[in-house]
Amino acid sequence: MTLDIQRRQDDNEIDLREKGRGAEGQTIALDRRLYMQLFAFGGVEDTAELAGALEVAQIPAVLYADLNDPYGVALLTFGESPDYFLETVHPLLRAWPFDVLAPKPELTMFGRTYAIGYEQDLEETLITRPSKRITDPKTPWAIWYPLRRKGSFVNLPAEEQRTILMEHGGIGRAFGRAGYAGDIRLASYGLDKNDNDFVVALIGPELYPLSAIVERMRKTKQTSQYLESLGPFFIGKAIFQFISTSVGQ
């Protein structure tokens, strides 16, 4: 009995909310996050039929034309509950016209938005900004990929980790300030069949700057020394985008 009580007390101390930093330096928290799932398909004869089905369904989604497959597409959906994908998205994919397509499971990606700890507006960071960014018609091009860091990175001192991540992230921020690209960063710990840590999307008005980001990041310490795996990559251009006011709830 004593052990059971202690377990309940320990469980109650686990705080899974996303953390940020208020204007006066205080810790703020929000128990909300956005999940995103990417499915890729081949064997597409008419993308207009797929877009039409999504238009009727009125679910938050982006449909991409696959640059590397003239008969390929990828569908990105997003919502605040994992149940949403099982109860709403998956039934849609089991019905016409998606049910006749050929799935590409190697390109399936799933992850959740997360806070680093310094954000002052958690709802903007976790929900509003990523959903708007992914459905912005001005930035139709996207490169999606998963990655896994080496275990040795986790064992580095916290300050050294920050320095490595700042070098890597600084490239993306520079491209963002210039209007060339934005990004979506999702945690996928325990959510990915290949044990990847993150899912990343680079998004922009043109494809070349997104490729240039990947090229420049190859030289960073994180990519060159502390990545276990990177990819596979999906490269596509949005041909349908929709976001609802409820964002999948």
Image (tube, rainbow, N blue to C red):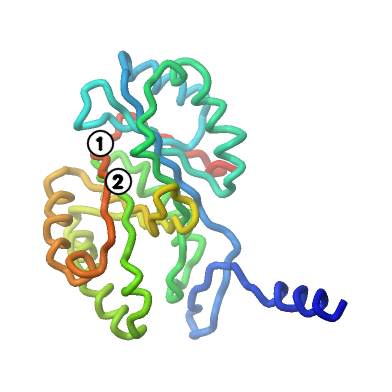
Q: Is residue 232 above or below residue 163?
A: above
Residue 143 placed where, x, y %?
25, 45
Which amino acid type corresponds to the residue marked 1 in the rendered image?
Gly
SS label for mark 1? strand
Q: Which of 48 and 42 lies nearest the eye of the viewer?
A: 42
Label 1, on which residue? 236
Which amino acid type corresponds to the residue marked 2 in the rendered image?
Trp
Residue 86 placed where, x, y %?
58, 36
Mark 1: few, some, or many residues within 10 Å (few <14, many ≥20)?
many
Residue at left offset 39%, top offset 27%: 103
Residue at left offset 50%, top offset 65%: 122
Q: Is residue 185 above or below residue 161?
A: above
Q: Which of 158 and 190 lies nearest the eye of the viewer?
A: 190
Residue at left offset 43%, top offset 71%: 116
**Quick one: label 1 or label 2, which is nearer the N terminus?**
2
Q: Is residue 77 above or below residue 111?
A: above
Is residue 59 found left or right of 42 in the rendered image? right
Residue 142 placed where, x, y %?
26, 43
Q: Quadrant of residue 182?
A: bottom left
Q: Quadrant of residue 174?
A: bottom left
Residue 219 placed where, x, y %?
12, 66
Label 2, on which residue? 144
SS label for mark 2? strand
Q: Quadrant of residue 38?
A: top left
Q: Is residue 143 above or below residue 178?
A: above
Q: How many marks?
A: 2
Mark 2: few, some, or many residues within 10 Å (few <14, many ≥20)?
many
Is residue 44 found left or right of 10 in the rendered image? left
**Do the numbered discs 1 and 2 sit on residues whose CB atoms are within 8 Å?**
yes
Residue at left offset 26%, top offset 63%: 227
Looking at the figure, which quarter contains the N terminus?
bottom right
Looking at the figure, which quarter contains the C terminus?
top right
